[in-house]
Image (tube, rainbow, N blue to C red):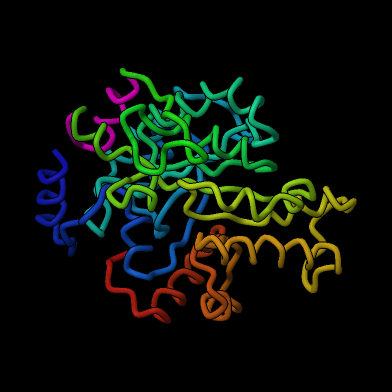
Amino acid sequence: MRLFLILAFAALGFAVDRPKRINRAIELLEQGQPIYYTHGHGGFEEGKNMAQTWADYINYEMEHGTFDFHNLREFMRGLIAGGPTRSGHLTPAVIVTIPVGGIDEATVRANYWMIQQTLATGIHGILFCHARTAGGVRAFVEASRYPFAKIGTGPGKLGEGLRGSGSQRYAAQMWGMTEEEYLTRADVWPLNPKGELLMGLKIEDKHAVANAEAVASVPGIAFAEWGGGDMAMSYGYLRYPGRPLPPDMAKARETVWNACKKHKIFRLEDGNVDNVEAQIRDGIMVISAGADPAAAEKGRKFTKRKMPW
C-alpha cells in the first residue's frame, strides 16, 4: 500500500524519494539533519489537512488536551488520506505527549496502559513528561516494547517489554505494512538501530533536574528537553521568564544539557528565524518552530538538507 501511494503521489507531479524508514524524523536524525515540529490535537479532518505539513513531525498534545484515543486514531487515518508526504513517507512522524508523568516507577507501572493504548494508534513515538526518576523512565521504555525485544535487556538494564499481542493490528495499518512487519520494527531507536519509535523526555522540574544524569542514562531514549514552562513553575515563577534566564533556571538548563551530552541523546529546544542557525550550531537537533515554517526553511537551507519538504 505504501509503495502504491508513493507512486500515485509521484504521478501527480510531486518529486518524491523512496524513503528508507517509516519514521521520517529518525531518518533525518540518522543523516545528521535537525528535525522541526509543529502541533496537532484534532481528528480526521485535521490529520488530512496536516498531511502535507512543512514540519518533520507533529507533536500531538494529550498531556493537557483531550485524552481521546478515538480522535488520535482518526487523526492518523486523516494523515494517510491526505498523504503521502513530499518526502515519500506515508505520513509525517507523530509524537504524542500523554498525561502520566515519570514521577516514579510505581506511578508509571500503574498507568502503563496509557502508553500501550497510545502506541496502538500507529503513532511514531512519545514525549514523556515530568521525567523525575530513572525507575519511572525505565518503566516507560519497557511499556513501549514487546517482550521479544531483547536489545538492552538483562540484569541492571531494561526489563521485559510490556506491549501485548493485538496492539499491532491498527498500528500496522497506519504504517502500511503487515502485522508481522510492524512487530519487528516497532521498537525504540537508537537502542535498536532498526527501530522506528522515537521516544523523548521532558526533564522539566527541579526534581527531574536533581536526577537528570540518571534519567538521561536510561537506554531507549533518543531526545530530551528541559521544558522551560514547567521548569519556571517548579522554581516559583508564574510563567516562563524569557531570555536571559534567571540564574536558577539557567543552571537547570545547563544541568539537563550536560546530562544529554554525556549520554548522547539529542536535545530539543525552540527555534525561530532569528536564532535557528545559532541553535543548530549549538547542537540543538529537535527544534520547536511552532507555527512558523520560515524557521524550518532557514534551518534546512543552513544544513543543506536534501530530503524534500
Residue 90 location in percent, x, y? Answer: 25, 46
Whether 87 is drawn above or below 43: the answer is below
Residue 242 location in percent, x, y? Answer: 78, 66
Residue 120 in sight in this render: yes
At a point 86% along the width and 53% down the height, the residue shown is: 235
Split into 4 quadrants, where in the image is the C terminus? bottom left
Whether 187 is drawn above or below 194: the answer is above
266 vs 243, left or right, is left
Report the span colored magenta: 166-178
Residue 130 in sight in this render: no
Most foreground residue, 305 or 115: 115
Residue extending farthest to the front is 155
Whether 64 is drawn above or below 110: the answer is below
Whether 134 is drawn above or below 117: the answer is below
73 vs 252, left or right, is left
Residue extending farthest to the right is 236
Split into 4 quadrants, where in the image is the N terminus? top left
6 vs 217, left or right, is left
At a point 47% along the width and 24% down the height, the residue shown is: 69
Residue 110 location in percent, x, y? Answer: 61, 20
At a point 9% along the width and 55% down the height, the residue shown is: 11
Is 172 contained in the magenta span? yes
Is 48 contained in the magenta span? no
Most foreground residue, 307 or 251: 251
Quadrant housing residue 46:
top left
Residue 113 location in percent, x, y? Answer: 51, 21
